[in-house]
Image (tube, rainbow, N blue to C red):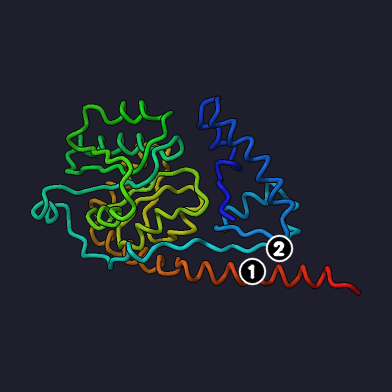
């Protein structure tokens, strides 16, 4: 059901240096492709994933399939709060907090976000950045190089217990999501549910999930990331509109809906299988 798109997107696998991690994803590409082709039916968790994988494996179009997005915990739900201008926000808290929650990995591009925020700081914007999530061993040095000397405005919190994540969402002013490879980004839905204005990667499937509820950028382009954040910083009314849209869209992603659609699809598959194997 929950296919890892790193297994199928070669350009994203190639962000990893030649070695065990890349070999692992290449091997999983073979295993998961064979599994999908041998299945009685397949569930995809985004239209993007279905289209991409079926393009690689055209025979899948002959099998029953259903797109059933994952849900998000209701614990993150919070009605969007009134968005303040930078000046008004500074009079309240003294800084404008940006937050990026995700594992630190090659395709998540946290270092590009750090560089973009550094640009904004140099231009006089009073922003701080919180990075939340575990880091894989291969990029520890890269993350450290990006953040060294910037501790006054970049805070890496590492892996935070799940029960504490909601407080991080609810105490941020702008959420950033800079991944270039996702199947169905649960973290993005959590931020949407938390009522946050969002600057997001334009890579699929983010626009499928966030729709017109965020401001997009190319996660590989530092200047574009900085420009997207700057736009939202300077437009409080747009932040309000986008956060309200995102919050509304997030209500569709529930575990109840996911489970009901899954059981319905499985029942249909089993019923059809029983009909085809029934003795004549």
Up/down of 203 relative to 65, above or below: above
Q: Residues within 10 Å of mark 1 (few under 14, many from 20)?
A: many
Quarter of the image with the C terminus is: bottom right
Specify whether 94 is left or right of 195. left
Up/down of 28 relative to 87, above or below: above
Q: Residue furthest bottom?
A: 280
Which dot marks residue 265? 1
Q: Residue at x 39, y 38 (%)?
A: 104
At which x and y percent is residue 168?
26, 52
Q: Which residue is mark 2?
A: 64
> Could you give the CA–CA distance between mark 2 and mark 1, rounded to whole angstroms?
9 Å
Q: Residues within 10 Å of mark 2 (few under 14, many from 20)?
A: some
At which x and y percent is residue 264?
62, 72
Q: Nearer the viewer, residue 39 or 16?
A: 39
At which x and y percent is residue 207?
47, 55
Mark 2 and mark 1 in contact? Answer it, CB < 8 Å. yes
N-terminal-most mark, 2 or 1: 2
At which x and y percent is residue 144?
31, 28
Specify whether 46 is left or right of 230. right
């Amino acid at each position: 059901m929950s296919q890892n798109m790193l297994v199928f997107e070669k350009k994203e696998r190639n962000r990893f240096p030649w070695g065990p991690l890349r070999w692992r994803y290449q091997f999983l590409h073979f295993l998961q492709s064979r599994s999908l082709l041998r299945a009685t039916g397949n569930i995809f968790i985004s239209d993007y994933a279905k289209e991409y994988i079926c393009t690689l494996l055209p025979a899948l179009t002959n099998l029953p399939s259903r797109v059933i997005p994952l849900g998000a915990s209701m614990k993150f739900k919070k009605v969007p709060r009134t968005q303040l201008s930078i000046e008004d926000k500074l009079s309240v808290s003294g800084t404008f907090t940006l937050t990026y929650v995700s594992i630190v990995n090659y395709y998540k591009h946290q270092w590009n976000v750090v560089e973009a925020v550094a640009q904004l700081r140099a231009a006089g914007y009073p922003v701080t950045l919180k990075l939340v999530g575990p880091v894989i061993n291969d990029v520890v040095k890269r993350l450290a190089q990006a953040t060294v000397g910037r501790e006054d405005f970049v805070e890496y919190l590492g892996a935070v217990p799940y029960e504490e994540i909601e407080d991080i969402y609810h105490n941020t002013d702008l959420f950033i999501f800079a991944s270039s490879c996702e199947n169905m980004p649960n973290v993005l839905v959590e931020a949407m549910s938390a009522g946050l204005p969002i600057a997001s990667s334009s890579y699929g499937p983010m626009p499928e999930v966030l729709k017109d509820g965020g401001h997009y950028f190319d996660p590989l382009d530092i200047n574009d990331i900085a420009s997207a954040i700057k736009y939202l910083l300077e437009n409080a009314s747009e932040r309000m509109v986008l956060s309200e849209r995102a919050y509304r869209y997030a209500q569709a992603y529930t575990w109840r809906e996911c489970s009901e659609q899954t059981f319905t699809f499985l029942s249909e598959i089993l019923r059809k299988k029983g009909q085809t194997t029934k003795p004549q």
